[in-house]
Image: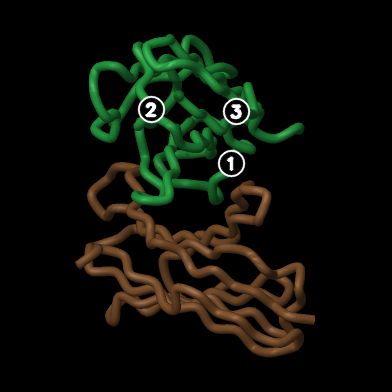
Chain colours: A green, B brown
C-alpha cells in the first residue's frame, strides 16, 4: 500500500480564495482524521470520520472550513474563503477499527503545507 | 496547565546515549500514543498503549495508568533518531479526539 496520500504537498493562495485539500486513506482503514499543525498551537484535530460519516467536527475552526468523505477512499477539506491565519500544515491520517477497537496506531499522510498570502 | 505535558522540550545527547522522554497527562485516557515527526515534517506513529510496556527495536514505551505518566526510551541512540517526539492522549470517553503534547525535540550528535 502506498500509505495515506495527500495532495497537494504545497499550496500558496491569496486571501479570499477557495482551497481544497485532498486525502486518500489506506485501503481498508475505516477511520479518517484531519489535523492541523501550527507553531503556536501544535497539532489539533479538526474532524474525523468513521465509515465515511463525520463523528466529531468540534475542532473545525469556523464555518469557512468544511470536510467531506463521499466514499471510503477519498476525503476533502475545503476552506472558503481562506485567510492568512489558516496558514499551517494540514495532515490527514487513517486508522483501522474492528468491533469498536483500534487495531493499531495512526498512519499519517505527508501533509499539505498551506500558505495564504 | 495543558492536559498533556511533555519534558524535556529540547534534548541534545551524544550518539549511543540512553534517552528518556516523559509525558504526563491529567485527563482520563483510553490510550496513549507516541508519534515521531522527522525534520522533513512527516509523522510516524510509534506506539499505541493503554497499559504496561511495548518495545520495537531500540524504542521502548511504558505507561503507568495510576500515575498518569508515560515514558519513551531510546537505547543506543543514533543521529537518525533526531526528530520531534510527540505524545498524545486519547479520550476515555468514547471518541477519537487526541490531546497532543507540545513535543520534545531530540538531537543526537555523532
Q: CA distance from mark 2 to mark 3?
A: 28 Å
Determine the chain carrying the residue at label 1: A
Q: Residue drawn at (55%, 50%), measured in percent from left and top?
A: A104
On residue B72, which mark appears? Answer: none
From the top left corner, tell me how far across and down residue B110 is, in percent: 80, 81
Spot the residue most to the left: B1
**Residues flagged by tags 3 and 1 on a common chain:** yes
Q: Residue furthest front?
A: A117
In primary-sequence order, the first of circles 2 and 1 is 2
Q: Which residue is mark 1?
A: A108
In this view of the protein, which residue sits in the foreground, B33 or A11? A11
**Residue at x-position 67% and y-position 68%:** B82
Q: Is residue A88 positioned above or below A16 on the image?
A: below
Of the two numbered discs 3 and 1 in the rendering, the one whose residue sits closer to the viewer: 1
Which label's residue is closer to the chain start, 3 or 1? 3
Q: Earlier in the sequence, mark 2 or mark 3?
A: 3
Q: Are marks 2 and 1 in contact (CB under 8 Å)?
A: no
* Alpha carbon separation for disc pair 3 and 1: 9 Å
Q: Secondary structure at mark 3?
A: loop
CA neighbours of label 3 inside 10 A, class few (<14), some (14 to 19), many (20+):
many
Please give the residue where the numbered disc 2 appears in the rendered image: A84
Instruction: Determine whether A96 is above or below A30 in the image.
Output: below
Residue drawn 55% across the image and 62% down it: B47
- Say if labels 2 and 3 share a chain: yes
Label 3 sits on residue = A25
Q: Secondary structure at mark 2?
A: helix
**Which of label 2 and label 3 is nearer to you?**
2
Between the C-alphas of marks 2 and 1, the distance is 25 Å
Q: Provide the secondary structure element on which disc 1 rests.
A: strand
> Residue A88: x percent and y percent?
46, 36
Report the front residue among A77 and A1.
Answer: A77
Amino acid at each position: 500500500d502506498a500509505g495515506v496520500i495527500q495532495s497537494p504537498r504545497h499550496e500558496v493562495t491569496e486571501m479570499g480564495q477557495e482551497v481544497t485539500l485532498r486525502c486518500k486513506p489506506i485501503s481498508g482503514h475505516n477511520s479518517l482524521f484531519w489535523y492541523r499543525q501550527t507553531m503556536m498551537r501544535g497539532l489539533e484535530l479538526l474532524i474525523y470520520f468513521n465509515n465515511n460519516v463525520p463523528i466529531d467536527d468540534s475542532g473545525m475552526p469556523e464555518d469557512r472550513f468544511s470536510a467531506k468523505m463521499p466514499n471510503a477512499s477519498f476525503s476533502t477539506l475545503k476552506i472558503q474563503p481562506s485567510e492568512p491565519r489558516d496558514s499551517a500544515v494540514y495532515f490527514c491520517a487513517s486508522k483501522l477499527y474492528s468491533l469498536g477497537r483500534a487495531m493499531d496506531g495512526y498512519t499519517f499522510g505527508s501533509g499539505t503545507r498551506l500558505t495564504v498570502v | 496547565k495543558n492536559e498533556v505535558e511533555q519534558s524535556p522540550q529540547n534534548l541534545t545527547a551524544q550518539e549511543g546515549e540512553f534517552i528518556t522522554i516523559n509525558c504526563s497527562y491529567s485527563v482520563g485516557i483510553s490510550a496513549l500514543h507516541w508519534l515521531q515527526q522527522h525534520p522533513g515534517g512527516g509523522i510516524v506513529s510509534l506506539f499505541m498503549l493503554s497499559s504496561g510496556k511495548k518495545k520495537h527495536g531500540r524504542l521502548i514505551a511504558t505507561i503507568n495508568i495510576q500515575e498518569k505518566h508515560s515514558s519513551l526510551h531510546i537505547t543506543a541512540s543514533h543521529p537518525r533518531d533526531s526528530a520531534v517526539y510527540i505524545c498524545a492522549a486519547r479520550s476515555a470517553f468514547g471518541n477519537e479526539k487526541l490531546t497532543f503534547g507540545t513535543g520534545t525535540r531530540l538531537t543526537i550528535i555523532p
